[in-house]
Amino acid sequence: MSQYMLLLYAETVDEAGQAAREAELPLFAELHKSLREAGLLVAVQPLRSVESATSIRVRDRELEIIDGPFAETKEHLVGYYILECADLDEALKHAARVPLARYGTIEVRPLLPHEEWIAQARRAGTDDEAVKHLA
Amino acid sequence: VSGDPVSDAIAQAFREDRAIVLATLIRQAGDFQLAEDAVQDAFEAAVSAWRRDGVPANPAAWITTASRRRAIDRLRRAEAIASRAERLGELLRLDAQVEDEPMDDESTISDDRLRLLFTCCHPALALPARVALTLRALGGLTTGEIARAFLVAEPTMGKRIVRAKRKIAEAGIPYRVPPDDELPDRLRGVLRVVYLIFNEGYAATEGDRLVREELCDEAIRLGDLLTQLMPDDAEVWGLSALMLLHDARRAARVDADGRFVALGEQDRSLWDQERIAAGLARLERAIRMRRPGEYQLQAAIAALQLAERTDWAQIAALYGALVRLNPSPVVELNRVVAVAMADGPAAGLELLEPLLEEPALERYQPLHAAHADLLRRADDADGAALAYERAIALTTNAVERAELERRRNALSRRGRR
């Protein structure tokens, strides 16, 4: 089993459009129930609207704060799932069940397993004590 | 054939056994790249071992064992591979029983090659990567040959293949034949990749010609493999028939000066009768299954085009069925041309009207060339001249341009008003 993150992207819509999307919440609830019962749902959470996004970067020890998302795109990140799946085919199948797939785009990405991350840290010379806190 | 028995034996094993060994080893080792490297190692080791000890009685078994041992060595060193201990245990167990190793039975071999084919053609890979990976893993082409065939630099193609294999491993693309509910869709995807390989070799006129013929041959071999692995699918037979029927005319399509020769003017004695017979037999078999599909329809059209007297009415009907299955203005244009051949230019011109108003086809050269031909046949020399001009302006291919100019100039000689 591996963990996959589904990143949900959608365009911002007007109030009527938003109301139409919210009318689909029972469909989401139904999907989450079925995923949870199958033991696949690790996490799910929507994000607040992109207007509330703030991005930061530190360059030469200077903090730069930017109003808005990392990149100006038509579709914005609006939420995510983490699912436990046997393989990519299973993850794609469940992603296609998310009602948002009909109007937005869902990016499916495997999470890097903790063991691999720890192995990376060891190869980079991180000591065992520090590695414990990494993941 | 080089005449050197060891080189010949290795070349033969590479052609006949490599894909089978690789397909099985990917399943056992659980890693595409590692299995491919191990098989590569085994073939390299064969060169010196077979020169020293002679060609083994069963080269395929030798390559299988050598590949497995190389995979074990590589797996011992590869810490990053998931479930490495299990994989290693499985390979060591297989290696221990090698003395009286029963060769894998036919169905296991078939299953492994199908797994490999479906993995290489997985829709989560970009289409060019699917094509390259399929040719690399199941065909016997080297990265350099694939690069030359697709007119890309070899390092670019190499990176494309490596990236695809890494995605298979990291994204967790499963190594299996899709379950029944996904199989029809996924099989269409596999057929599409095979047909794309064929067309790349067949339709393009630029590039290294030998390598391009190699692409047609590879696609036909893959089509053949699919008929063995999935004999119950009518479209599998349809695609195999379609490729054979087109390829039978390969030698007649280009004249001594490299110029394209239209179907009606081809030297029929150059057609490969054996391929035609094989293609027709496959088409028959497909049609008997009574599950029509686009490849069968195209194969049936290709078959009718081979007849001494072309039955245009039937070709038009087949294009009609194709349009219903796969609505596309390009296929509709082919239908209109066939109707005009069967019922005369007036019937064709009438059906062409809606296509001429289609914005997507405004710059589609074959539409304007067909329009010009129909106007010429309807004795509208002025209209035809205008349409030829339009078609010529849209042509990028020098051979086609020369042909269109020849037709336009013939118009004026017949006395335009």
Image: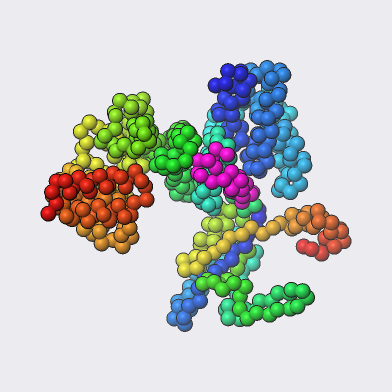
Front one among B401 and B234: B401
Q: Which image quadrant is residue B33 in?
A: top right
Considering the image in quadrants, where does the C terminus of chain B appear?
bottom left
Query: Where is residue B55 shown, x and y percent of the image?
Result: 65, 19
Query: Where is residue B320 shown, x and y percent of the image?
Result: 25, 48
Q: Is residue A128 visible?
A: yes
Q: Is residue A134 magenta?
A: no
Q: Which image quadrant is residue B383 in?
A: bottom left
Query: Is B99 positioned to the left or the right of B200 in the image?
Result: right
Q: Residue at x 34, y 43 (%)?
A: B399
Q: Is residue B161 magenta?
A: yes
Question: Compared with residue B409, is residue A92 higher up or lower down, i.e. above or below?
Answer: below
Q: Residue at x 77, y 42 (%)?
A: B77
Judging from the image, the colouring scheme is rainbow
Q: Residue at x 17, y 49 (%)?
A: B412
Query: Is A92 positioned to the left or the right of A43 in the image?
Result: left
Question: Compared with residue B96, is residue B202 higher up or lower down, i.e. above or below?
Answer: below
Query: Where is residue A111 shown, x and y percent of the image?
Result: 67, 59
Front one among A31 and A48: A48
What count of labels does the image hold? 0
Query: Is B281 positioned to the left or the right of A37 in the image?
Result: left
Query: Where is residue B268 shown, x and y percent of the image?
Result: 29, 28
The part of the chain drawn in magenta is B144-169
Q: Main secondary structure of the magenta part?
A: helix
